[in-house]
Image: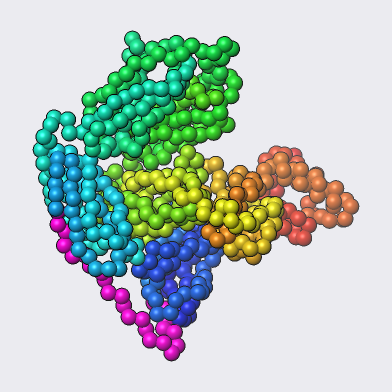
Amino acid sequence: MKPGQLSAVNVTSDSVQLSWPPQKGVDFYILQYRVQSSAAVQNVTLTGGRRSFIITGLTPATKYLFSLYSVSGGRYKKPLLLPLTTKASPGRDRPKKQKEIKLGTLSVSEVTANSAAFSWTAKKGFDAFLIQYRVHGSGAVRNFTVTSGNRSATITGLRPSTKYTLYVHGVSNGKHTKPLSRVITTKASKDKEAVKLGNVSSSNITANSLRLSWTVDKARFDSFLIQYRVQGSEETQNITVTGGQRSHLIVGLKPTTRYTVYLYGISDGVRTEPLTTTVTTTAAAEGETTSPAQLGNVSSSNITANSLRLSWTVDRAHFDSFLIQYRVQGSEETQNIRVTGGQRSHLIVGLKPTTRYTIYLYGVFNGKRSKPLTAAVTTTASTDKEGQSSVTDLGSVSVSKVTADSLKLSWETEKSYDSFLIEYGPEGSEDVSKLPVTSDHRSAVITGLRPSTTYRLYVYGLSGDQRSRPLTTSAKTAASAVKDTVKPHKLGELSVSHVTNQSSKLSWTASKGFDSFLIQYSAAEPRGVYNLTVTGDQRSTFIKGLRPTTIYTVRLYGVAKGQRTKPLTSQVTTAGILCRKQIVCFLLQAFVESLRKGLSYHSAADGDALPVLKILTCVSHGMWSGSKSKAEFGMEEKFVLSCTDAP
C-alpha cells in the first residue's frame, strides 16, 4: 500500500476489503461508495482507529467509486479515492456497457418581447431535461426541469430587446449531457409597460394589522416588494414576498395610525412603478396592550466570510418567537428566519465575503411584531483558514425528485474541484447536516428528511483547504403518504453510560420492525451535526472521537420504510482531565483505603514507600508530577509518582 492511498484486497463479485494508512488526529472516518453511473450514495461512519473495512452486498462486474473522508474537529479533509470493478459472477457473462444517450438538435419557434418557445430532439431513455437560460454575458443563471416525455418548453418573464442564451441538458442516471444551446434576442415591447401590475387593495384591517392584495395584468414577476410607512415619517419598512403570492398580511402596526403602502413588482432585478394605497388602522380594543414585551439590545459576533452569530436580550415579558430579516445594503431582496421564543442567539450562514448586511430583529407576541432592533455588519474577506475562495464560484443549483423523506440536488460548474460539500438543515434551525460528494459528481440524493419540512441547502466546491461561495436553494419535502395507513413503530427510552473524555455508550429500547437507527450528535462549539447509522437489530452503540469536557446533544431516530420517528433526545457531558484539587481529593480517599486495605504507593526513583502525607504536601506546593494508571486512578495498578522534597 502506497503512502496516503486507499487500497483494495480480496475483491470478489459482491464484496471488497478496503484498507488505508493511519492518519493523526482523526476523530472519525466517513466511507462513501456508489456505482459510478448512479447518484445513490451509501455512507458508513467508522471510528478514527480503524485501518480497514469489508463492504458486502455489491453487484457483480460493476464499476464502483469508493471515497474515504477523514473528519477532524468538524472539518472534512480531501478524500482518498479508489475506483474499482467487482469480479464477474461465476457462470455469467459480463454485462455490456450501456451506450451514452445523446441529444439531437435545438430549435426556437417563437420569440416575443417577454417569452421564447423552443423544442429539441432526443432519443428515449432520459430521466428528465434541465433547461437553463441567462442574459447573454451575465453570470446569473435560471433553471427549471421538465419531465422525460417533454420535447418543448416556453420561457416567460423575459425582458424586451434583450439577448439571452438558452441551454438544454439531458439528465440520465444523475448525469448531465453536454448541452444544446441557442442565442436569442427578445422583441421590442409594443407598449412602454410590457410588465405591469394591476390593482392593489386592503382588507381585514385591525388595530395592528392589515391584508394587502393585488392583481397582475401581464407577464410573470420573480418577487414583490412591499414598503410601508406612517404618513409624514421617513422610516420605511420593507417586506419581500415570492412572485406567486397575490396577498400578504402586514402585522406589527400601530392603532389609529394612517399608513402609506407601496407595492413593486420585480422581474430580473428591475422594479415596476409602484401601486400605492393609504390605510388607517382601527382603534385598539379596550384593555388591549400594543407593546406586550420589549427587546433589549442586539449584537453580532463570530463574524466570518460567510456567517455571523446574532445575539439579543429581552428587557421584560416573553415573546412567542423572533423574526430575523437581513439583506445586502442597497438591495431589496430580504431573507427571513424565524426562531423560537426561548432562543437568544442564532447563527446566520450562507453570506457573501466582504459584504455589508443590514439585519432587523423583531419579537413576535400574540401575532404582533415589536419595533425592530437593527444592526449593520460587514463580513470578513475570504481567507485560507476559513476555507472560502472569493474568486471562483460554482454555476447553478436545482432540486428534483422530491419525496416525503428525500430529494435530489444537482449543480453545475465549469471549474474542477477536489470534492464538493453539501450542507442542509430545516429552515430556521441551526441543525446542519453535512454530506461530502466526490469531484466527478454533479448531483446527490439526500435521504432521511422529514415530511412536509422546508430545508435550506448549500453546495460548496472544495479545492485543497479552500471552498467556493455556496450555491443556495430551498425545498419543501412532500407530505407523508403513509401517515394514517401504517401503524408506526415506536421508540422507548434512551440512556447514556460508560462516559469517558472521548466516548460514550448509548442504549435504547424500541419495538421490533425498524430498518435502522439514525444517531445525530452535536456540540455547541464547534457547530455541526454528526450522523451515525446502525442496523435495526441493535439497541446500543459507542460514540467515539468526542472532545473532553464538552456538552453534546444526542438525538436517536428510528427509521422504517424510509420514514423517521420523532427523536429521543439526551445530553452527554464528556469527562475532563483531573485537576489538582481532584487529585488531592482522590489521594485523601486513597489514604483512607490504604489504612483499611494496607495498600501503599511507591516512588518512581527507588521503590521506597512514599508517605501519603508527603504526597499531599507535594501536591499542595505545586511540586507533584506523575501519570495516571490505565484504571484511571483505580486500585488494580499502582500509581507512579515523583516528587521533590517538600518542607
Which sits in the foreground, 302 or 626? 302
Q: In this view, does 221 lie to the left or right of 405?
A: left
Residue 390 appears in which quarter of the rendering? Answer: top left
**In the image: residue 347, left or right of residue 542:** left
Question: Bounds of the magenta span?
Answer: 85-108
Q: Is residue 140 above or below residue 190?
A: below
Write the residue at 36% across / 38% down.
351
Residue 26 in sight in this render: yes
In this view, which residue lies farthest toward the right?
A: 596
Magenta segment includes 90: yes
The chief SS type of the magenta part is loop
Quadrant, the N terminus: bottom left
Can residue 139 be seen at all in this image of the molecule? no
Tell me if residue 75 comes above or below residue 254 in the rendering.
below
Percent x, y for residue 11?
45, 79
The residue located at (50%, 74%) in the rendering is: 57
On the image, the x and y values in percent for residue 224 come to 31, 31
Q: Residue 322, percent across and down?
A: 50, 29
**Residue plotted at (43% across, 79% down):** 60
Where is the C terminus found, in terms of image quarters? top right
* 17 in the magenta segment: no
In terms of depth relative to the viewer, which is nearer, 121 or 143?
121
Left or right of 180 on screen, residue 631: right
